[in-house]
Amino acid sequence: MLAYFSVFAIFHTSVLAARIWNNTGVGTIIFEEAWTPPVLASTVGKQTPPVGQTSEQLAENLLDVHNQRLAGMDANGVDFMVLSCTSPCIQGISDPVVAAATAKQANDELAATIANNTLRFGGFAALAMHDPVEAAKELKRTVEELGFLGALVNDYQQTNDSSMIKFYDTAEFDPFWQVVTDLDVPVYFHPRSNIPLLSNLEFGHSSFLRGSSQEFAATLSTHVMGLSTNGVFDRFPTLKIIVGHMGERIPSDFSRINDQLARQVVNGMPMQKKLSDYWRTNIFETTSGNFGTDLLKFHIGQIGLDRILYSVDYPFVTIEQGTEFINTLAETTGLGEEDIVALKRGAAIKLLKLDQ
Ligand SMILES: *[C@@H]1O[C@H](CO)[C@@H](O)[C@H](O)[C@H]1NC(C)=O
Ligand SMILES: *[C@@H]1O[C@H](CO)[C@@H](O)[C@H](O)[C@H]1NC(C)=O
Ligand SMILES: *[C@@H]1O[C@H](CO)[C@@H](O)[C@H](O)[C@H]1NC(C)=O
C-alpha cells in the first residue's frame, strides 16, 4: 500500500509541475529582468535610464509587462522571460513586519499579473530577509502555490538599525538555505544601491561611480564571496546561486583570490575548497548588462560554458543590445551553433527546470 501511494505521489507531483511555455526550440530565455510591482510603485526612486531614454520611460517600462515588454520579446525572439521585483525591492525595507507583508503582496501581484500569459512569463520570488525562517516559508509558498521558479534577492537586507545590515552567509541563514536546497530552486543574487551610510563614505567623492559602473559589483561580489568563505556551499553542496553581469567580476580574478584566500586557512576560514571551485558546482553567471565578448571567452575558460547563461537586465538594458550580442556571437567568439544554443536557452531550461 505504501509503495502504491509513493509511486502515485511522484506521478502526481510531476504532472502538477509540468510547465507549458512558449518553447520555439530556437528563442532565448532571459531571467534578470526587472518589474515594479504596484505595491512598490510609489517608492521606486528616479533611476538612470539607458542612453537615449528618459527616466520616465524607464519607470514606465518597469511597470509594464504585457505591452512594450512583450512586443520587445516578440521582435527579438525571446521565448520566455522570468520577472523579478526591481532593486532594492524588499531588501530596502527596514521594518521586518512591513517587509514581510510587502514581499507577500509583491509576489501575489506578480503571480496575478502573469497569470494570463505563463506561456511567456515566469516569476522569481521577492523575499524579506530579516528572518531566515519566514523567508523560507514565503519562498516555499511562492514555488509550491504560485509556480515561481526560484527567488531573487537584491544583495543585503537593510534593517531598522542603521548600523546593521544582514548578509546571508552566516549560520543564522542555514534554515533558509536548507529549504532552498530542499525545494531545489536557484536564488539569484542581484545588486542594490548601498544604504546612505556606506554609499556616502565610499562614493561621496565621485558619485558617478554609484550604481552599476562600480558600486553594485563591489558590494555584491563581497556578499557572494562571503557565501563561499563562510562555508555555505560546503554545508549545502547542492545549493544553486546565480550571479548576473558576468559574475560581478569574480571569475575574472580567480588567480589572486585563490592565492590570497589560501593564507586565510590558518585563520580558521571554514571554506573547504578553492573559491573558484564553487563556480563549477554551485554558482552560475549570466551575461545580463555585460556583453563583453572577450570577457565571455575568458570566462568560458575559467568556469566552463555550462555555467554561463544569457540574460539581458531589461529595462535597464535594451533587449536589442542583447539580441545584437547573441546574433553576432559566432563571429565575435567563434562559438559553434550548439554552444550558442546552450548559452541562449539550453542551460536555462535545465537550471530553471522548464522541461519538467
Ligand atoms: C513565442 O516566442 C516567439 C519569440 O521567440 C514569438 O515570436 C511568438 O509569437 C511566441 N508565441 C506565442 C504563442 O506567444
Ligand atoms: C493579460 O492581461 C493584461 C491586462 O489586462 C492584458 O493587457 C493582456 O493583453 C492579457 N494577455 C493575454 C495573453 O491575454
Ligand atoms: C526592529 O526590528 C526588530 C526585529 O528585527 C524589532 O524587534 C524591533 O522592535 C524593531 N525596532 C524598531 C525601532 O522598529
Image (spheres, grey):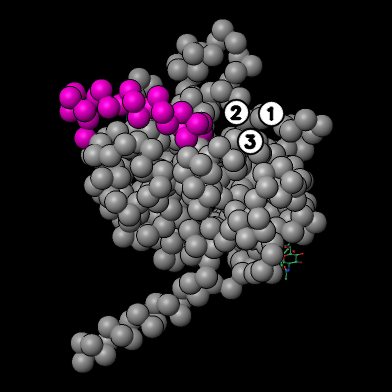
Q: Is residue 260 magenta?
A: yes
Q: Residue at x 69, y 39 (%)?
A: 317
- Mark 2 packing: few (<14 Cα in 10 Å), some, or many (20+)? some
Q: Is residue 200 magenta?
A: no
* Above or below 222: residue 303: below
Q: Residue at x 60, y 10 (%)?
A: 206
Say left or right for 287 vs 319: left
Say left or right for 13 vs 52: left
Q: Quadrant of residue 227?
A: top left
Q: Quadrant of residue 277?
A: top left
Q: Position of residue 165 (x, y in %)?
A: 36, 28
Q: Which residue is mark 1?
A: 48
- Mark 3 packing: few (<14 Cα in 10 Å), some, or many (20+)? few
Q: Which residue is mark 3?
A: 294
Q: Which residues are magenta?
A: 248-270
Give amino acid for label 2. Ser
Q: Determine the secondary structure under disc 1.
A: loop
Q: Which residue is mark 2?
A: 212
